[in-house]
Image: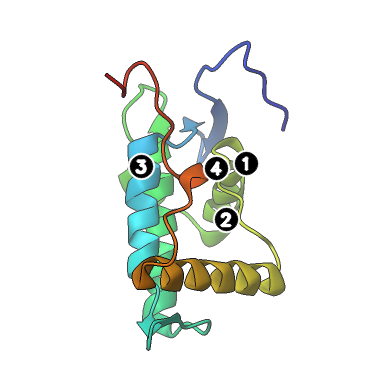
């Protein structure tokens, strides 16, 4: 999907399910924050390391986080949240909508185990340096100063 700064309007994707009209909205920042927070709660850290293998409870929490994000982004034809309806839809429908939500909300993550393992290792190294006081947080990940946030 191509993006343009000419229009920063919210992306909306209309669709039909069960004979009814719905609209998938791109995820808002508060919805993404809640989603990422839930995702982090599903990760196990033991001995200061992220455990790569997930048990059923962790997988359930991770899936519930994605479903909650989707529910926050689907509205019915009258503009009301359709989250309650979404929870009862088949997995095939949920999966397709989650895939589209990933695209329109820039939520794609690395798609290989190797890429994820490398990223985990980088983050663990960065965290160890910060905890030991030998490194400052990576400023490229911090919000930039703007006229709104700076005095």
Decide: few, some or many residues near mark 1? Use Cα within 10 Å; few <14, some 14-19, many ≥20: few
Label 3 vs 4, first from the N-terminus: 3
Give how far across and how far down residue 6 sits, in percent.
63, 11
Quadrant of image for the N terminus: top right
Label 1 vs 2, first from the N-terminus: 2
The residue at the point 49 percent across, 73 percent down is 124
The residue at the point 37 percent across, 87 percent down is 46
Q: To which residue does mark 2 refer?
A: 95
Decide: few, some or many residues near mark 4? Use Cα within 10 Å; few <14, some 14-19, many ≥20: many
Mark closer to the observer (4, 2)? 4
Q: To which residue does mark 3 refer?
A: 31
The residue at the point 55 percent across, 34 percent down is 16
Label 2 vs 3, first from the N-terminus: 3
Mark closer to the observer (2, 3)? 3
The CA distance from mark 4 to mark 1 is 5 Å
Label 1 vs 3, first from the N-terminus: 3
């Amino acid at each position: 999907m191509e993006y343009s700064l000419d229009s920063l309007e919210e992306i909306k994707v209309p669709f039909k399910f069960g004979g009814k009209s719905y609209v998938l909205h791109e995820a808002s920042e508060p919805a993404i924050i809640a989603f990422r927070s839930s995702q982090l709660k599903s990760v196990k850290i033991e001995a200061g390391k992220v455990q790569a293998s997930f048990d059923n409870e962790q997988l359930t929490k991770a899936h519930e986080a994605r479903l909650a994000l989707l529910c926050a982004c689907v509205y019915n034809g009258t503009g009301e949240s359709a989250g309650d309806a979404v929870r009862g839809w088949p997995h095939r429908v949920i999966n397709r909508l989650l895939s589209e939500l990933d695209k329109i909300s820039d939520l794609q993550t690395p798609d290989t185990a190797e890429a994820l393992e490398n990223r985990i290792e980088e983050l663990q190294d960065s965290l160890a340096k910060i905890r030991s006081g030998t490194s400052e947080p990576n400023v490229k990940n911090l919000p930039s100063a703007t006229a709104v946030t700076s005095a």
